[in-house]
Image (cartoon, rainbow, N blue to C red):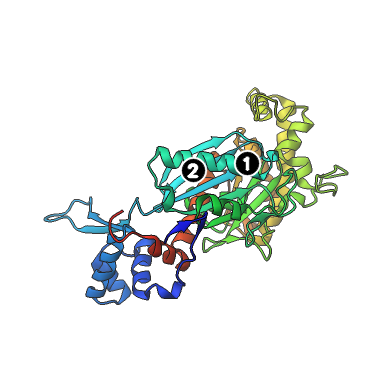
Amino acid sequence: MHKDDGYAEEPPAPGSVSQALRRVLGLVVSGEATNRAEIARRSGLARSTVGQQVDHLVGTGILQEVESRRSVRGRPPRVLTISPQAGTVVVADVDTAASHVAIADLTRRLIAQSTVDIRIDAGPQAVLDAVTERLRELLEKHHRDPDRVREVVIGLPGPVDFQQGCAVQPTGMPGWDGYPVADHLRTRFRAPAVVDNDVNLMALGEAVQGGAETPLLCIKISTGIGSGLITATGQVYRGADGAAGDIGHIRAVGGGSVLCVCGNIGCVGAIASHRAVLRGLGIPESTDDDLLYGTRVLAERIANSDPTALHAVRQAATEIGEVVAMLVHMFNPRSVILAGPLSELRDDLVSAVRAAVYQRALPLATRKLTITATQLKGSSGLHGGIALATQDVFGPAGIARLLADAPGAGV
């Protein structure tokens, strides 16, 4: 596939890729088969057909065939895996104060990550240009061919139209409403681009990298409060229009008359978010020199067992726990993962949320439920983006693009 003028040519229709080739690659990608004999047995294809397809995939650099590291007598068996040089996916997790970026190969191996210190209110063009520049630097530094970027995934901290690839009326994000983020990135990287809500990616990351059981509910407590839901089959649940999970605007039990940025009063995000806790304690969220100033000050006060700070965090956790209890009844998840700055402050937040959920929810919904803080810290969104990208790359249309873009032989 030749690339010019910033755009990739349309890939061949998925139906033009042979069913045998797609079947062989699918078995290796899923891990169901690791050698030619297993592929033949599981696919029902003739050994000669399997051999032809495997040779083609190895020749184009999509698969590699290497000797197994298992200790066996005689000649070590040869196994098939995705080639580390088959391509790269690039991911960005945009947050209010900074953006985290990463590159990975198609085996989901994280190659490198970095942080871009730019506020989201700088506007979409400035943020996306800064993110693109850093990602290109990582590609160059780690000798990854920019023309073999297979997919770009970006997470945004606001409502997202997944199909159109843009944010929809996000709060605190001037200039982002309707901005064609996916088109912008598609042009810069000459590869398919996907835009999703940041908490959806965090939830997916917790499921695939953190090992949390599904169904899974991830709650991000940051500038606002949002959630992502992973179904029992490992898919992100986005709802009819991509608005699923925007729980920060549910009215809180103790919301009173507190005004929310959405214009309503009493939203849980207005009284229990990280920003709301800082505001209630009189701690500036950031300074000109330190974008994370408020987080550090609050962490110090919690570490020193400051009673006012402890009370504020526990009160916020109780309000969040009331909403989580409702979600537990609605979705019956197996895991609830708490993420964001407040979740990293000792165990006070997690304990208070857990107490509220177990008090309010019925035993059937909680008897096998686990509620924990994230173990991935700030990387869950990146891992989720990598997982989403590789899922797309190895879907029918993605496989067609892979094969169309592969060189005749070698990598």
Q: Position of residue 298 (x, y in %)?
A: 68, 28
Identify the residue at horizontal 79%, vertical 32% (top origin): 280
For the residues labelled 2 and 1, the Cα–Cα distance comes to 15 Å
Q: Secondary structure at mark 2?
A: strand
- Nearest the viewer among 242 and 11 is 11
Q: Which residue is mark 2?
A: 102
Q: Which mark is residue 79?
A: none
Callout 1, which amino acid? Val
- Callout in the foreground (2, 1): 1
Place of residue 347 in the rendered image (x, y in percent of width and height, measured from the top left): 61, 36
Q: Is residue 243 left or right of residue 17?
A: right
Would you name the residue on which mark 1 appears?
127
Position of residue 165 in the picture relative to residue 311 (left or right): left
Which quadrant would residue 19 be assigned to in this image?
Answer: bottom left
Look at the image and tell me in which quarter the N terminus lies: bottom left
Indicate the quadrant where residue 120 lies: top right
